[in-house]
Amino acid sequence: MGFFRESHFFMLSFESEYGRITWKKPYGSVIIVGTKKGMLNILVLMTFITFLFSAEYGLPTNTTRRITGTFGECRITSNTYVKRLNIGIAISTNSMENTNIYAMNDGVVWKLILNDPSYGNIIYIKHPDGLSTMYAHLNRFSSKFDAILQSVMVEFGEESNTEIEFNSNEYTVRKGDIIGYSGKTGTALAPYCHVEFLDYQQGIYIDPLVYLKDLLDRPDADLEIIKVRVDGKEQNISNGGTYFYRNQYPEIEINARLADNSWNSRYGVHRVQLFFDETEVYQLLFETIPEEYYEQGDLVYGEGSTSSYYWYKLFSNKTGGAVVLNRLSEVSLSKSTKARIVVEDDWGNAKTWSFYLKQE
């Protein structure tokens, strides 16, 4: 894969099943890079443009202020069944296509992606504070991108999985500019607005609610602790009950969720803490997720977890990603240990379950 420049022409070169194919195209200042799978990168070289930046982020849609999916929820890839973490949030557009999607802050367009297998049509915007925002499942993009999109689709086809990356400030946007329109492209079952925040310098995804929570409606929802597994044995929740384990420490999984009373929706929780004799020994926190932990959902979610049904694992042989505290290897339990699990949502509500553990 590569690109070359001859005078004012740009040459596209990539490997295919038929050998190495090279095209020339007089695109001026646009460099195109392709691969044999049809993925395309377009880097646009432009001069630097400065503009004022707002420190406050706004909502990407004004259709509703209702959240329908939270950061860190379990997701399972359709082809490999690998558990991964939801690195964004979902905001309802009342299942309507072609509602306006707005830039959440001032910035420059970083990438456009067409026909991604999972996220469909996507736009990325870089902001001066070191963050980028991502908007997915778009039905279509703003008309300001029509010229370059038309050129790409004519060359590579309307159905090709295509990525266009801008190297500088060809397309600046202001907070509130229309950048696209809601849809259900990719694997979305209905139209909605999926957004992500990425610290692109550190490679860390950040819960969008850190920036948007005060702008969204607080859900009419209750935290639920439904069942527990100890050493793989599924059991009912009993306040003050006793549960038995076999090894040095119990392998505990908790089935918990945030249940929306108004919309019959189920969301993931923000934090899960495990205490032994009032000492915190384990914590899951869904606030930041480094890129390398994106597809390590098995570290957090147990067997039977889905996009709306969550078994949170409170044991692991390592710390990282959503596992922000792991002191299990330091634990020396008595014959009967008082234990406590606390689950918390993004709005500071908490639910506690107390019980006892005994070694068999």
Image (cartoon, rainbow, N blue to C red):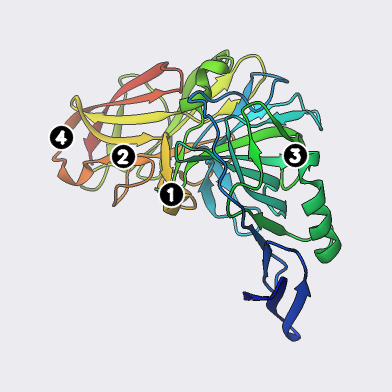
Badge number at residue 252 = none
From the top left corner, tell me how far across and down residue 13 is, in percent. 69, 77
The residue beneath circle 4 is 335
Question: Of circles 1 and 3, which is in front?
Answer: 1
Classify mark 3: residues with Cα within 10 Å, few (<14), some (14-19) or many (20+).
few
The CA distance from mark 2 to mark 3 is 33 Å
The CA distance from mark 4 to mark 3 is 50 Å
Indicate the amino acid at tag 3. Leu
Which of the marked residues, 2 or 4, is nearer the chain's N terminus? 2
Please tell me whether mark 1 sits on a helix, a strand or a loop: loop
The residue beneath circle 3 is 189
Please tell me whether mark 4 sits on a helix, a strand or a loop: loop
Label 3 near label 1: C-beta < 8 Å? no
Quadrant placement of the N terminus: bottom right
The CA distance from mark 4 to mark 1 is 44 Å
Question: Observer-nearest residue: 116 or 40?
Answer: 40
**Where 169 falls versus 13 (above or below)?**
above
Indicate the amino acid at tag 4. Lys
Which of the marked residues, 4 or 1, is nearer the chain's N terminus? 1
The CA distance from mark 1 to mark 2 is 17 Å
Q: Is residue 139 visible?
A: no
Please tell me whether mark 3 sits on a helix, a strand or a loop: loop
From the top left corner, tell me how far across and down residue 253 is, in percent. 39, 38
Label 1 near label 4: C-beta < 8 Å? no
Question: Of circles 4 and 3, which is in front?
Answer: 3
Badge number at residue 324 = 2
The residue beneath circle 1 is 203
Which of the marked residues, 4 or 3, is nearer the chain's N terminus? 3
